[in-house]
Structure formats: structure tokens, C-alpha cells
Image (tube, helix red, strand yellow):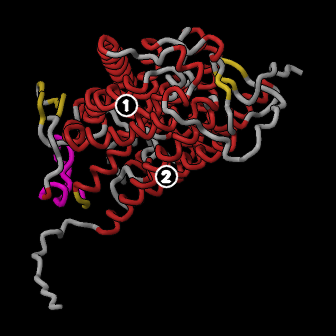
């Protein structure tokens, strides 16, 4: 065999292989947060007869978002061209395909401000895809145990395109909210506020679960713990990848992420001890996730003391919303996604406007500083951005589901719901431990979340 070698002209002087390697790793870590992380976390939290349905809905969303992302979503959210521009402010990108060989191999130029990166478009596309994919999977937690799978199949790709991509354009890619000064380091608003408000709107439209199934009964705490571990450590890629390289700020974002999460988890546990007298594994997992969410908009902008403040806030404020305020909404948000994601995301976003430290931000966004450092405008614009995202996401989610509901039922039939996975998918989940779950010693039942059993809260 004769091998012929040709010299390829050096047209990749822009490429930083270290940055590219880290970004591909970070992308994979974030992907693992969804598949299998969230899929098995939800499978452990839901009733056993809905385990397959929870995993299938997560798996479908991951694949469906990738297809719509390539065909239209990426350029709609991160493309350099603008479909709508008003007085110099970029409102919408252009939904167009992004699969040509010359594009995926070329240098990444991102957003309407045309930021040039040291990695190829293919890497940025995949990194931003795993963010887009996890968002409807998070939303799923609010409508578990009743949504028609066929309606979900239609909802996910359309929602990703018309809701997620525009908000990403505004707050990730240099669109009008970024131009006004709003910041979102890694998705406290773009991902978690989207998911939490979307879950609330979807639960409102679809309606509650079967009356005798309103309490969330975790069927496998081992799966809950395994899922949480994948989510927590996967978040290092989630926040550590947003500087688009192996930078000083990436290291700052990762340490802040883990500190805030630990503080939030412990704060939530202390709240459980104070009001429920016993710590709960599921309570601790929700507290950890609230901390992950809260630090996300701030991770690369604050110092470690700021991360601790955010962790304390997300261990208290979402807890209060979950147990004291959200139940008054009279909406069946199955896993409390509104409180743990929307509320925690807003808390983190507002505290970014307070705690952004110019010593830290010099490495990623020079000049950015919070109210604590004399810039009170930043707190105001963070609040304004939160209001805009809430109104946009709720209105679009509500309207889209109403439209889909005209053509296909949004809920599974009661007959199928009474049977569960065997009726919906023709297969059933198994207890992978091989043993029946042990009777719990106590339970925390509130806001439709059945924490670890079915006994009354021990008030002693």
C-alpha cells in the first residue's frame, strides 16, 4: 500500500488546543448532567410505575433538542446575523441551519457583536447544545406523572426554538439585555428561570396529577443520590466552561460553584432540622441543586465570600418558597421546579448585581461591578432582565401548550395513568438494588413533594 501525504495550509492559527480540549470535556460533563444525571434523579424521585416515563421524556428531549439546534436553534441564539434590530439593540437572531463543513470547522464567531473565540464552531455548538437540552429536561420535573408523551414530543423542539434560543440571544450572545448591561454568567436566567417559569406555566395548563397520586413518593433514594452526584460534579463543566477556555476565570467559577453548593445544601439541611426536626436526603439534594442554580449566574463574577452569601440565600429563600409560598399557587408543580430553579435563579441573578467583584470580573468582563462596589445600576438591570424573562417565558409556554392542546391531548388518559409505564411505553422500571425499599422513619410532605415515606412529620 502506498500512502500519499499532502501539506495542509495552516489556516487554524486562531486555534488554542488547550481551550478546545477543556471545552469538549466541559461539554461532555454538562451532557452527563442530563443523560443520565437528571434522568435517573427523576426516576428515583417519581413513583415506581412512572420511572420509565420520566427517563424516556428526558432521553427524548435530549435528542430532539439536538436536531432542532442544528437545523435552526443555534443560529437563532448565537448567530452573527440579526433578524430584528431596534435602535441598535439586537432583538432576534436568524433561525437557520448550521451544519456546513466550512462552518463547523471554522473559527467560532459568536453573537451579533461577533466575538471571536479560540475554538471552532463545532465545539461551541455542542457546548451550547447541552445547555439548551438540559433546560426542557429541568422543566419536565414540574409536569411529571401526567403529560401525554406525544404532546411532549411536539412541545420540546418548538419550545426550545421559540423560548430558549431568543432568551439565550438576549443574555448569552450579546443581544439587547446584554447591551443594556444585564449579565448571566452561565444560565441562572437563560436556563433555570426559563425552566422554572416554563414548568409553572405548563403545570397550570396541563393540570394536576391524579388526585390519589398528588404526593411525590420517591421510589429509590439510591438513584436520587447517584443522579445528584452526576449533576453536582457535571456542574463544573456547566460553569467552568463558560469562559470558553482553560482560563483563570474557569478555575474561579468552579471553586465558587462547589462552595456555594455545599453552603446551600447545609443551610437547607439546617432549615429541615429547625422546622421538620430531622434531615432528609431529598431535602439535602434539593438544597444542593438550589445552590448550583443560584451560583450559576454569578460563578465567574464573585469571590468565594460572595459565593457563600449566595449559598446561604439559596438555602433559605427557595426553601421558604417551596414550603410556604408555592403551595398557595394551587398549581401541581410535581418536584417544585419553580422554587428550586426559578426562585433560586432570580436570587443568584440579583445577588450578581450586588456582589460582582471587579477583581474577579477583570478576567472575563472588565468593568463589571455590583452594587457592593458602587454600581447600583447593575442590580436594577438584573431585576429588569428577570422580569422580562419571566413574562416572555410564561406567555410563550402557556400559548404554545394551548395551541398544541387544540390538536392533541396534553394529558395521558386516567386509565393509562392508573397503570403507568406498562400502558404508556409497554415496559416497566425495576428496583436495581434487588430489594424492596425499607420503610422510612419519617416523612416530609408539603407542596406535593413526598420526601422519604408516608408517615406524618415528627414534631417532637
Q: Residue at x 43, y 40 (%)?
A: 59
Q: What stretch is highlighted in magenta?
A: 102-117
Q: Earlier in the sequence, mark 1 or mark 2?
A: 2
The residue identified by callout 2 is 236
Q: 32 or 266: nearer the eye?
A: 32
Element on which disc 1 rests:
helix
Q: Is residue 154 left or right of residue 296?
A: left
Count of numbered tags = 2
Element on which disc 2 rests:
helix
Q: Which residue is drawn at 51% across and 47% down?
A: 36
Q: Is residue 28 left or right of residue 318?
A: left
Q: Which residue lies furthest to the bottom in this view?
A: 2
Q: Position of residue 386 (x, y in %)?
A: 38, 24
423 to 430, vertically: above or below? above
The residue identified by callout 1 is 378
Q: Which residue lies furthest to the right in this view?
A: 460
Q: Quadrant of the N terminus?
A: bottom left
125 to 338, vertically: above or below? below
Q: 404 or 14: nearer the eye?
A: 404
Amino acid at each position: 500500500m502506498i500512502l500519499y501525504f499532502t501539506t495542509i495550509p495552516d489556516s487554524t492559527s486562531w486555534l488554542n488546543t488547550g481551550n478546545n480540549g477543556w471545552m469538549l470535556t466541559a461539554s461532555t460533563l454538562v451532557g452527563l448532567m442530563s443523560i443520565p444525571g437528571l434522568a435517573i434523579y427523576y426516576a428515583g424521585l417519581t413513583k415506581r410505575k412512572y420511572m420509565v416515563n420520566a427517563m424516556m421524556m428526558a432521553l427524548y428531549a435530549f435528542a430532539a433538542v439536538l436536531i432542532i439546534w442544528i437545523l435552526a436553534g443555534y443560529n437563532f441564539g448565537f448567530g452573527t446575523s440579526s433578524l430584528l434590530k431596534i435602535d441598535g439593540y439586537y432583538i432576534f437572531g436568524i433561525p437557520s441551519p448550521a451544519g456546513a463543513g466550512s462552518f463547523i470547522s471554522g473559527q467560532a464567531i459568536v453573537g451579533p457583536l461577533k466575538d471571536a473565540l479560540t475554538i471552532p464552531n463545532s465545539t461551541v455548538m455542542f457546548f451550547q447544545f447541552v445547555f439548551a437540552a438540559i433546560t426542557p429536561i429541568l422543566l419536565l420535573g414540574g409536569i411529571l406523572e401526567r403529560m401525554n408523551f406525544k404532546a411532549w414530543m411536539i412541545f420540546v423542539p418548538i419550545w426550545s426554538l421559540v423560548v430558549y434560543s431568543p432568551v439565550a440571544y438576549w443574555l448569552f450572545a450579546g443581544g439587547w439585555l446584554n447591551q443594556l448591561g444585564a449579565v448571566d454568567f452561565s444560565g441562572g436566567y437563560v436556563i433555570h428561570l426559563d425552566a422554572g417559569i416554563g414548568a409553572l406555566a405548563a403545570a397550570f395548563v396541563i393540570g394536576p396529577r391524579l388526585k390519589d397520586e398528588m404526593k411525590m413518593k420517591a421510589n429509590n433514594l439510591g438513584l436520587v443520590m447517584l443522579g445528584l452526584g452526576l449533576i453536582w460534579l457535571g456542574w463544573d463543566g456547566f460553569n467552568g466552561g463558560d469562559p470558553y477556555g482553560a482560563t483563570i476565570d474557569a478555575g474561579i467559577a468552579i471553586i465558587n460553584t462547589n462552595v456555594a453548593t455545599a453552603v446551600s445544601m447545609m443551610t437547607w439541611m439546617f432549615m429541615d432540622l429547625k422546622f421538620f426536626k430531622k434531615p432528609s436526603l431529598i431535602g439535602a439534594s434539593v438544597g444542593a441543586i438550589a445552590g448550583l442554580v443560584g451560583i450559576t449566574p454569578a460563578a465567574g463574577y464573585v469571590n468565594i465570600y460572595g459565593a457563600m452569601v449566595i449559598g446561604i440565600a439559596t438555602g433559605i429563600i427557595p426553601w421558604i418558597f417551596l414550603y410556604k409560598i408555592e403551595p398557595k399557587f394551587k398549581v401541581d408543580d410535581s418536584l417544585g421546579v419553580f422554587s428550586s430553579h426559578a426562585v433560586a435563579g432570580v436570587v443568584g441573578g440579583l445577588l450578581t448585581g450586588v456582589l460582582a467583584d471587579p477583581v474577579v470580573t477583570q478576567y472575563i468582563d472588565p468593568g463589571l461591578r455590583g452594587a457592593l462596589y458602587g454600581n447600583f445600576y447593575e442590580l436594577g438591570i438584573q431585576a429588569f432582565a428577570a422580569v422580562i424573562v419571566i413574562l416572555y417565558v410564561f406567555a410563550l409556554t402557556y400559548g404554545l401548550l394551548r395551541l398544541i392542546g387544540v390538536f392533541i391531548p396534553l394529558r395521558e388518559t386516567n386509565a393509562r395513568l392508573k397503570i403507568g409505564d406498562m400502558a404508556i411505553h409497554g415496559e416497566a422500571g425495576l428496583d436495581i438494588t434487588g430489594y424492596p425499599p425499607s420503610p422510612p422513619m419519617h416523612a416530609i410532605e408539603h407542596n406535593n413533594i413526598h420526601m422519604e415515606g408516608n408517615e406524618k412529620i415528627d414534631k417532637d
